[in-house]
Image: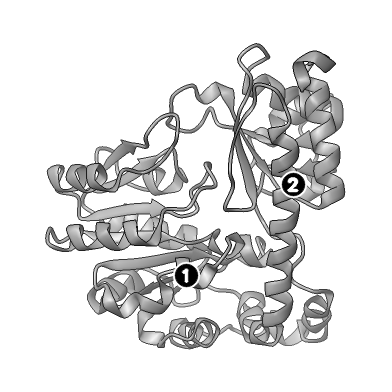
Amino acid sequence: MLQNDYNTRAEKYDFIKSQHGGYYRHNFIDHAYLYNLYFPPEEVFTKFKDQIHDIVLNYPVAQTVLAQLIGAIIDQPAERIVVGNGAAELIKIVSGHISGKLIVPVPSFNEYANAAPLGQVVEFPLEFPSFKLDIDKFADEAIRVKADVAVVVTPNNPTSMIIPKSDLIKLSKRLLTNNCMLIIDESFLDFTENLEEISLEKEISKYPNIAIFKSMSKAYGICGLRIGYMLTANSEFAEAVRTGVHIWNINGFAEEFLRMLPDYKEEFLASCIRVRSDRDNLYKKMTSIKGMTVYKPDANFIFCRLPDQIKSAPQIARDLFIKHNILIKDCVGKTQPDADRYLRIACRTEEENNKLFEALIDVMDMNDEERV
């Protein structure tokens, strides 16, 4: 049995910060990772148990059938789809092997830049302090540096804000004339209002230089199953990515989940409504803190700037864990101004969010006059 490499709560925090998962083994409240706590329903786990022998003892299907399974869920032809072992596998293929020069607005999900070879990424700063993306400036820079892949994440991580659909369409048209693919990461889009009016999935056939990436871990609450997909009408780009995946890149549990998922569409939609409600209530609480800048969230997490007079974000996050056994994420690892003043807080249940709020007030050491 592996031993936990810590003896005190401070050592435990340092250990956890060095990890990339397995948090459930360490007995703390995780407000750092971003996923849906209300899905899948318990019946899904019962079905897994009933089929566990077949799932464990047999090879899973390969890419052709996997794409058909995703296609049935999102109502798209299989030839437009590549299924990854999480979106991270697809990101590694595009950033690390297909793209010659990639441009990405920052702060954003770090993996797009991290997966690319040294010198092949251009980081484009979002407007500060609004963290809005200026589409025209971004397109100008992509064209100037001769990028062949541009990436936008909507809602963005860590800012939790969407990029308007009209802006994305405008961006794709400008990049098309310069032979640049536009990756739109919609991993958190299920938590937004009016999803059908925001997503470009249904209109993908109109835009030959757009590829939509989606990690299913976030919205469907299945981080351990590792499923992601790419959707594009660009057959050449799809084949280039498809060639990069292994023959059995998805395990049998993930395959079985995809087979079950169409039976739980209503439960999934209801779970996203619950997440939005909990998120909105936490947002209202956070905005009550005097001096705290809280950005209106579109995803299932809150992005905020701490009041100037209190401790730094890394110290607040550390104190919150040591004193209250709650993990949140500071933004020091993000490319942005004043990164040590910003926090990203994942939404959990209403009860857990309330406890997080009170614990945060406690470690911020604000008196009643400062708080309101």
State the residue at coordinates (55%, 67%).
194
Quarter residue 354 falls in: top right
Q: On screen, 56 above or below 363?
A: below
Q: Residues under labels 1 and 2: Cα distance?
A: 35 Å
Residue 120 visible in rendering: yes
| Horizontal side, residue 223 vs residue 136: left or right | right
- The residue closer to the viewer here, 133 or 180, is 133
Q: Amino acid at mark 2?
A: Tyr
Quarter residue 265 falls in: bottom right
Q: Amino acid at mark 1?
A: Glu
Quadrant of image for the C terminus? top right
Q: Which residue is mark 1?
A: 197
State the residue at coordinates (77%, 80%).
48
State the residue at coordinates (30%, 80%).
205
Question: Which mark is on residue 23?
Answer: 2
Mark 2 secondary-structure assignment: helix
State the residue at coordinates (20%, 55%).
148
- The residue closer to the viewer here, 247 or 24, is 24
Question: Which mark is on residue 336?
Answer: none
Quarter residue 367 falls in: top right
